[in-house]
Image (tube, rainbow, N blue to C red):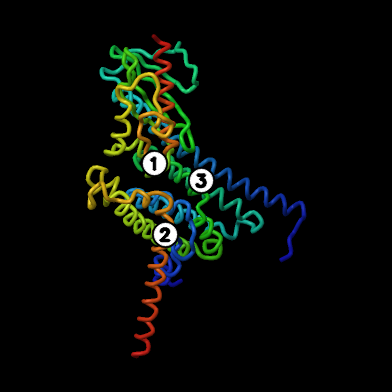
């Protein structure tokens, strides 16, 4: 096959690609405009639910002047029974966003995973509403100080095949506990 | 175009998973529960059909030097649309499949069918090809899901039936966890490919006998 290399032909190639990408971009912008509010609303609902799940009685205020040495705490909510920390530890291939409830004595009230991209069937179990997922998250309730998986000398049983995810969840809980300690 | 033959090819003789061995990454990774298999299968079928139609419609407009770039742009566009729609309307599925939805962009089934079929055939034939190949992919995923879920978690229909828990068929202390891990994926895939090869040979022999009887 003879390949044309004239300026006109090269220009045609570029223009064709430009047209295709522009059309795709416009179509995506349209779909995004429709779905973005819906996705934002779902995320807000999820955050609200996650806070209520880990902090009985819900929250009254959001604290903005917290001290966080780990860099993992993104938001802190305060309620009459304690605090809810939104932490974002690094999971297997992306950050996990999770909510950790800590009572006024520095004990974990509960954890809840807001969003993640862990491997389906392995790390994703940490967030699943199945018996295995609930058992995993239940281990953290009542813990204080610092937590780690059994492989690292702690007493949290890691999820089978998902040590990285389990470690990430532990580091998230530790960040929340440390931050709670700083709040006093 | 022979639609019956296309259907047969998609389902068995040119099944994207068991014969063409395309899209292995998602096949091995997500086939751990029935919900995942059906969801992934339908998502790929929808994207494959849409991209096949569009690429077939544009086949005389896209110069061959830039065809791969053009195809990938079109495919990525459809994948992003499906990703956004899933996030907005079926968040449970989007959560469960996680990163594998965006990764459909590089699923070679779609680029493979674009290059191998849609770029040389009419819009209608390409649409049928997309649906048939999609069904073949879904079927292979569902078979793998059922086997791995049963042996690995001891349940059937996880994420879908019985409030997401699935129906327990084997008491929870017996299933082999390895079956939902990567090693189980490879083992199951091997057996499924062997099974489909056996079935093809079996049908071949049967057809030949039929012809001989005539």
Quadrant for the N terminus of chain A in the image: bottom right
Residue at image coords 23%, 42% = B163
Which element carries disc 1, helix, strand or loop?
helix
Residue at image coords 46%, 28% = A89
Where residue A96 sits in the image (x, y, percent)?
43, 31
Q: Nearer the viewer, mark 3 or mark 2?
A: 2
Taking the view exactly as shown, the residue that stands out farthest to the front is A153
Determine whether B160 is above or below B205 in the image.
above
On residue B207, the disc is none
Where residue B86 sits in the image (x, y, percent)?
39, 42
- Tag 2 or tag 1, which sits nearer the N-term? 1
Q: Nearer the viewer, mark 1 or mark 3?
A: 1
Label 1: chain letter: B
Residue picked out by circle 1:
B94
Residue picked out by circle 2:
B189
On residue B77, the disc is 3
Residue A163 appears in which quarter of the rendering? top left
Residue at image coords 77%, 55% = A6
- Tag 2 or tag 3, which sits nearer the N-term? 3
Q: Is residue B28 rendered to the left or right of residue B111?
A: left
Residue A66 appears in which quarter of the rendering? top left
Determine whether B81 is above or below B44 in the image.
above
Where residue B134 sits in the image (x, y, percent)?
41, 58
Quadrant for the C terminus of chain A in the image: top left
């Amino acid at each position: 096959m003879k390949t044309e290399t004239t300026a006109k032909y090269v220009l045609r190639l570029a223009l064709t690609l430009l047209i295709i990408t522009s059309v795709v971009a416009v179509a995506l912008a349209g779909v995004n405009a429709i779905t973005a509010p819906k996705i934002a609303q779902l995320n807000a609902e999820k955050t609200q639910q996650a806070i209520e799940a880990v902090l009985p009685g819900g929250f009254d205020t959001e604290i903005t002047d917290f001290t966080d040495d780990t860099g993992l705490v993104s938001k802190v909510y305060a309620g009459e029974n304690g605090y809810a920390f939104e932490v974002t530890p690094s999971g297997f291939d992306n950050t996990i966003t999770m909510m950790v409830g800590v009572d006024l004595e520095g004990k974990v009230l509960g954890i809840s995973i807001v969003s993640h991209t862990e491997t389906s069937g392995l790390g994703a179990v940490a967030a699943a509403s199945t018996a295995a997922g609930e058992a995993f998250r239940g281990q953290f309730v009542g813990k204080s100080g610092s937590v780690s998986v059994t492989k690292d000398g702690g007493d949290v049983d890691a999820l089978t095949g998902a040590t990285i995810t389990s470690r990430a969840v532990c580091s998230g809980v530790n960040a929340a506990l440390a931050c709670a300690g700083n709040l006093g | 175009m022979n639609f019956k033959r296309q259907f047969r090819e998609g389902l068995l003789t040119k099944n994207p998973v068991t014969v063409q061995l395309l899209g292995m990454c998602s096949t091995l990774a997500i086939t751990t529960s029935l919900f995942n298999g059906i969801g992934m299968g339908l998502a790929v079928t929808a994207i494959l059909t849409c991209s096949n139609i569009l690429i077939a419609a544009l086949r005389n407009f896209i110069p061959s030097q830039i065809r791969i770039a053009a195809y990938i742009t079109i495919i990525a566009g459809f994948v992003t649309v499906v990703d956004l729609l899933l996030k907005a309307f079926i968040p449970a599925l989007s959560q469960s499949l996680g990163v594998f939805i965006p990764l459909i962009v590089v699923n070679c089934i779609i680029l493979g069918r674009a290059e191998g079929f849609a770029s040389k055939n009419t819009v209608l034939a390409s649409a049928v090809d997309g649906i048939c190949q999609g069904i073949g992919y879904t079927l292979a995923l569902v078979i793998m899901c059922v086997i791995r879920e049963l042996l690995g978690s001891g349940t059937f229909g996880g994420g879908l039936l019985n409030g997401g828990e699935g129906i327990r068929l084997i008491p929870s202390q017996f299933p082999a966890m390895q079956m939902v891990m990567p090693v189980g994926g490879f083992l199951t895939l091997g057996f499924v490919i062997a099974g489909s090869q056996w079935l093809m040979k079996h049908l071949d022999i049967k057809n030949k006998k039929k012809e001989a009887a005539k």
